[in-house]
Amino acid sequence: MRIAIVQIRGTLRVKKKVKDTLKMLNLHKKNSCSIISSKNNAAVGMLKIVKDYVTWGELDKETFVELLKNRGKLPGKKLLTEEYLKEKLKTDINTFAEDFINLKKNIKDIPGLKPYFRLKPPVKGFEKGGIKKPFSLGGVLGYRKEKINDLIKRMI
């Protein structure tokens, strides 16, 4: 299973440990998304450090396909295309996404693809509970299970 992490808050006046952890998770700006494996205990442990600045949950295949098609960037600010995948990996986006979600492939398998996705602010904004409250209390931050897919689709 894969975990999608979206940075919600900026890093102004933030402790160095938190900034460094966000960089290790490939989250460099607000509204950026990174994907980790749920089996990577180190990365899952990093979520505890940055929990007040990000939201995360289980990524599904459909959302990942949309991320690749609409937000996957190659060098030169070019979008990832189906033709590029067929040329480099001899596979299509749906097959790659299936293997990726099942932990058989990695983002690094696509040559030149950036390991993060830049997203727009969500359509119709964030939830009404506030940007500084945890998701469990009606806010935005923290663990949101499968509902992360709804947020990412609104941000693509």
Image (cartoon, grey):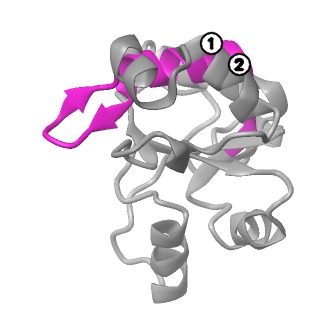
C-beta proximity under 8 Å, tags 2 and 1: yes
Mark toward the start of the polypeptide (2 vs 1): 2
Hey, what amino acid is under mark 1?
Answer: Asn
Which is nearer the eye, 84 or 133? 84
Quadrant occupied by the N terminus: top right
Q: Magenta residues, as a range?
A: 56-80
Image location (x, y in percent) of residue 73: 31, 34
Height in image: 47 above or below 80? Answer: below
Left or right of 90, for residue 57: right
| 6 in the magenta segment | no
Left or right of 135, for residue 14: left
Q: Residue furthest left?
A: 76
Occupied quadrant, residue 148: top right
Identity of the residue drawn at 63% across and 45% down: 106
Residue 59 at least partly seen = no
**Element at badge 2?**
helix
Which is nearer the eye, 136 or 145? 145
| 62 in the magenta segment | yes
Q: According to the image, label 2 marks what residue? A: 61
CA–CA distance in space, label 2 to label 1: 8 Å
Q: For the residue carrying disc 2, how many other residues have a C-alpha within 10 Å: few (<14), some (14-19), or many (20+)?
A: some
Image location (x, y in percent) of residue 135: 74, 39
Q: Which numbered disc covers residue 94?
A: 1
Identity of the residue drawn at 13% across and 40% down: 76
Identity of the residue drawn at 45% across and 76% down: 19
Identity of the residue drawn at 56% across and 58% down: 53
Image location (x, y in percent) of residue 33: 50, 42
Hey, what amino acid is under mark 2?
Answer: Lys
Occupied quadrant, residue 3: top right
